């Protein structure tokens, strides 16, 4: 019996040693290392060391901020996430941090539950907006996500929210006042193809090409003018997106293709209003050096982008959108004299003025279902609040 | 040190705690003084005054909203409802203080003359937030002279690691399963409801006992020995036994300061029934200001009485297997009552559990939940029994360096895994914060 206790005590002492070493190293790293402000792999801002003020301290803010600081800046954060993923896999789990570990290496974002009241508000605001501009050709589509299109890739029996019902609801309420396009069947027909990234929540250029082709009549584009020839270039083949970072599974690599319509003597200029920068292309090659390579399209999201083209046909398009539209834009370019792109999440100006001053003739609402479900900025921009 | 820790959550309430320390310190000293001077009446007045203030504070912070809501509902009045944030651990430290004051009043212990030692007792941070409820009697000598040794510190670290693993690896993971299932409407498949409530059964045990273990571990590092709070409650063979193994410190408190003063079981059956029901009503109510907690307390009161007077003896004669099954079903139903936010959701889930909603027994979602969680649930089940601890102790206490290396590696692996889950923690609820 004495032997027993003695040997346990020895074990306990070694455990103490390991415990102390881990704690000391982690603390030292937190203090010494320069804290990162942005997580490339998770594509989000990280919490910073809190400022010690009386106000912060008394309101309890300091401690909450200290908690998220430690969690976000913990040394080797990405490696820890991988350890967790390994353990989850051993337990037979098919999800990791809310991401479905699908078949063929696909990592699939769960379907989002609509966020009320902004969800209903947005739908009402779009109708109001459409009714006050009866002369414009207003088209809207909400793109279903991989979770509801690529059911063959999902773990069996996964209890997911039915996006089809959500989309039917949006369509029912919106199609009274504008031209709503449901892309579900179009995308479903191509579900075996590479229309969504494996490691990211976005759709690929191919996916948006199919969508564009389905929308041609609604967009009122003359079939005789249609360009069906593209220069297709693979700009990256080692892209790992947000789903990889969220889940910790970095095994799948994606390739990014860009589709440049082949048109003679066609040029355009892109103006990023927030950065006061102009460019002759919608592609941003510097994004290929970074982790989030999806930003090759337009360099990510901006409050307002103005594009002017050499096609002087008098059609001026206004887009309200999320990041799914960044890929889609490639296919729209040749058919308009100007395109104004508004991302309501970052835009706070008057949109009535945009329409009159820009002599807008066409409007497009393009969102993906998961972002649309959680958006709380669109209504305010449309109603000029 | 303890006070700084306390300020972590709601800094304003630090004032409340300081008040509590000073008030109870003075109050206990005056009780002791009147006792010495043989002024019985003054002693009783001082004592009652103390109880009123302590319980008054607890009631104000914990039950004000509940009381107002029910009064408004009953009398159609519209008293303003104020949302008062619950000071961390108020239920725990109020009960600790009361144990001290009552014991001083009864003369069981000498009064503490050193306000620092007394303050350390009240605000002792390891167990402040989630127990165990440490009675002053149990810790009196340690407050005045405790020893800190390397052996104790390392033992404390091991307790802490095990407690953290219970919380982070087991409780949080099954908690997620429970949340997912119970977020859906009760017309889900029968088996899904069962999986959900079983997940909650494991969550509450590992969450709470994990915190208790961490508190005990921290206590050991500081040289304190706290009483054990859980003794594998899920292997009990009756509801009565369950409560001897679950939240032991709370049970002890109610036995010492409510049940026995009321006469305990040394009275006639009618009075005994009354005593039991009072204790269990209070136990339920202590857990929170909601009807479901009260119902949960009364549920156990009735069960204990039934076991005592009706079927307890018969139960003991049945095969062990039946006794276990009986107890398991009882405490699972108990947790369903406990976790329900209101009576209608309780009703809905209860009907769903027994198939009265006309739902299928099993559906596709059930299969998914099972496929994803069966291993975890089995691990939780095994860890609810003493098997793992016994086996592990047996292995590592064998002679030979190899066995000791195994021991260290296992503890280190558990610790590393816990950190991995903590760093990832998008989900980290804290069940006993509410109490």
Image (cartoon, coloured by chain):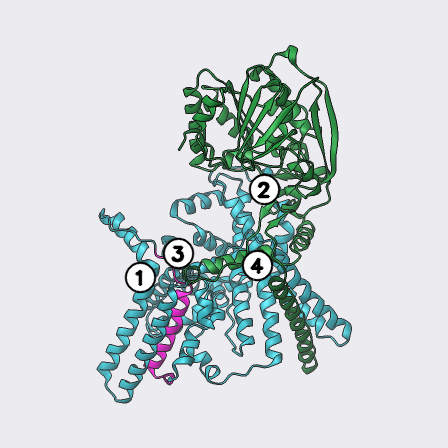
Chain colours: A green, B cyan
Label 2 and label 1: CA atoms lie apart by 43 Å
- Name the mark on residue A70: 4
Boundaries of the magenta span: B84-112
Q: Which chain does tag 2 point to?
A: B
Q: How many marks?
A: 4
SS type, badge 4: helix
- Callout in the foreground (3, 1): 1
* Residue B105 versus residue B238 in the image, above or below: below
Answer yes or no: are tags 4 and 2 on the same subunit.
no
Q: Which residue is mark 3?
A: B293
Mark 4 against mark 2, which lies toward the viewer? 4
Disc nearer the start of the sequence (3/1): 1
Q: Which residue is mark 1?
A: B60
- Disc 4 versus disc 3: nearer the observer: 4
Quick one: SS at disc 3?
Answer: helix
Q: Is residue B56 left or right of residue B222?
A: left
Is residue B13 shown left or right of residue A330? Answer: left
């Amino acid at each position: 019996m004495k032997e027993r206790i003695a040997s346990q005590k020895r074990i306990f002492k070694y455990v103490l040693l390991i415990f102390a070493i881990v704690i000391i190293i982690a603390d030292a790293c937190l203090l010494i290392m320069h804290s990162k402000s942005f997580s490339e792999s998770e594509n989000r801002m990280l919490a910073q060391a809190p400022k010690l003020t009386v106000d912060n301290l008394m309101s309890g803010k300091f401690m909450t901020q200290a908690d998220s600081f430690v969690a976000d800046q913990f040394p080797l954060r990405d490696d820890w996430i991988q350890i967790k993923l390994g353990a989850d896999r051993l337990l037979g789990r098919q999800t990791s941090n809310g991401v479905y570990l699908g078949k063929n290496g696909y990592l699939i974002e769960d379907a989002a539950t609509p966020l009320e009241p902004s969800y209903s508000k947005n739908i009402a605001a779009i109708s109001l907006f459409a009714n006050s501009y009866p002369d414009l050709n207003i088209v809207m589509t909400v793109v279903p996500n991989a979770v509801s299109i690529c059911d063959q890739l999902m773990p069996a029996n996964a209890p997911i929210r039915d996006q089809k019902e959500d989309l039917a609801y949006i369509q029912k309420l919106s199609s009274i006042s504008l031209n709503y396009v449901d892309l579900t069947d179009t995308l479903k027909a191509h579900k075996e193809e590479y229309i969504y990234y494996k490691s990211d929540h976005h759709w690929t250029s191919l996916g948006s090409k199919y969508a564009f082709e389905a929308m041609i009549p609604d967009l009122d584009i003359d079939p005789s003018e249609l360009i069906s020839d593209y220069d297709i270039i693979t700009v990256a083949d080692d892209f790992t997106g947000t789903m990889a970072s969220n889940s910790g599974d970095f095994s799948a690599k994606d390739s990014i293709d860009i589709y440049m319509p082949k048109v003679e003597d066609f040029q355009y200029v892109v103006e990023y209003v927030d950065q006061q920068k102009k460019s002759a292309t919608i592609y941003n090659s510097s994004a290929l050096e970074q982790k989030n390579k999806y930003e090759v399209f337009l360099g990510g999201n901006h409050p307002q982008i103005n594009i002017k083209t050499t096609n002087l046909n008098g059609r001026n398009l206004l887009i309200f959108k999320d990041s799914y539209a960044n890929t889609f834009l490639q296919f729209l370019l040749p058919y308009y004299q100007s395109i104004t792109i508004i991302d309501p999440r970052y835009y706070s100006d008057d949109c009535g003025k945009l329409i009159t001053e820009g002599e807008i003739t066409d409007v497009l609402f393009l969102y993906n279902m998961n972002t649309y479900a959680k958006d709380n900025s669109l209504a305010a921009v449309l109603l000029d609040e | 040190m303890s006070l700084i820790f306390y300020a972590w959550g709601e800094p304003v309430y630090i004032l409340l705690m300081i008040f509590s320390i000073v008030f109870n310190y003075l109050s206990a000293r005056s009780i002791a003084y009147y006792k010495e001077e043989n002024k019985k009446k003054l002693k009783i007045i001082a004592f009652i005054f103390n109880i009123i203030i302590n319980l008054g504070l607890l009631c104000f912070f914990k039950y004000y909203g509940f009381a107002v809501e029910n009064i408004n509902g009953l009398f159609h009045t519209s008293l303003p409802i104020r949302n008062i944030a619950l000071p961390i651990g108020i239920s725990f430290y109020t009960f600790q203080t009361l144990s001290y004051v009552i014991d001083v009043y009864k003369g069981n212990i000498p009064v503490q003359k050193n306000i620092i030692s007394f303050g350390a007792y009240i605000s002792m941070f390891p167990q402040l937030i989630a127990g165990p409820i440490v009675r002053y009697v149990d810790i009196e000598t340690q407050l005045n002279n405790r020893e800190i040794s390397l052996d104790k510190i390392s033992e404390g670290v091991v307790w802490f690691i095990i407690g953290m693993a219970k919380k982070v690896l087991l409780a949080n993971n099954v908690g997620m399963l429970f949340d997912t299932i119970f977020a859906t409407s009760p017309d889900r498949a029968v088996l899904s409801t069962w999986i959900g409530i079983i997940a909650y059964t494991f969550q509450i045990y590992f969450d709470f006992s994990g915190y208790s273990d961490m508190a005990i571990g921290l206590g050991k590092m500081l040289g304190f020995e706290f009483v054990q709070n859980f003794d594998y409650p899920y292997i009990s063979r009756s509801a009565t036994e369950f409560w001897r193994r679950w939240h032991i410190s709370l049970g002890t408190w109610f036995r010492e300061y409510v049940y026995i003063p009321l006469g305990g079981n040394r009275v006639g059956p009618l009075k005994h029934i009354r005593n039991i029901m009072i204790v269990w009503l209070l136990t339920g109510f202590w857990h929170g200001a909601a009807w479901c907690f009260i119902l949960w307390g009364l549920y156990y009161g009735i069960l204990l009485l039934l076991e005592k007077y009706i079927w307890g003896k018969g139960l003991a004669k049945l095969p062990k297997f039946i006794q276990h099954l009986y107890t398991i079903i009882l405490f699972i139903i108990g947790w369903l009552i406990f976790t329900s936010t209101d009576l209608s959701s309780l009703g809905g889930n209860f009907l769903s559990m027994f198939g009265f909603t006309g739902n299928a027994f099993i559906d596709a979602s059930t299969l998914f939940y099972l496929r994803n969680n069966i291993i975890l649930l089995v691990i939780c089940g095994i860890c609810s029994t003493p098997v793992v601890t016994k086996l592990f102790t047996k292995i590592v206490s064998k002679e030979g360096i190899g066995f000791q290396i195994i021991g260290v590696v296992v503890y280190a692996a558990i610790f590393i895994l816990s950190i991995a889950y903590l760093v990832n923690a998008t989900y980290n609820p804290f069940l006993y914060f509410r109490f």
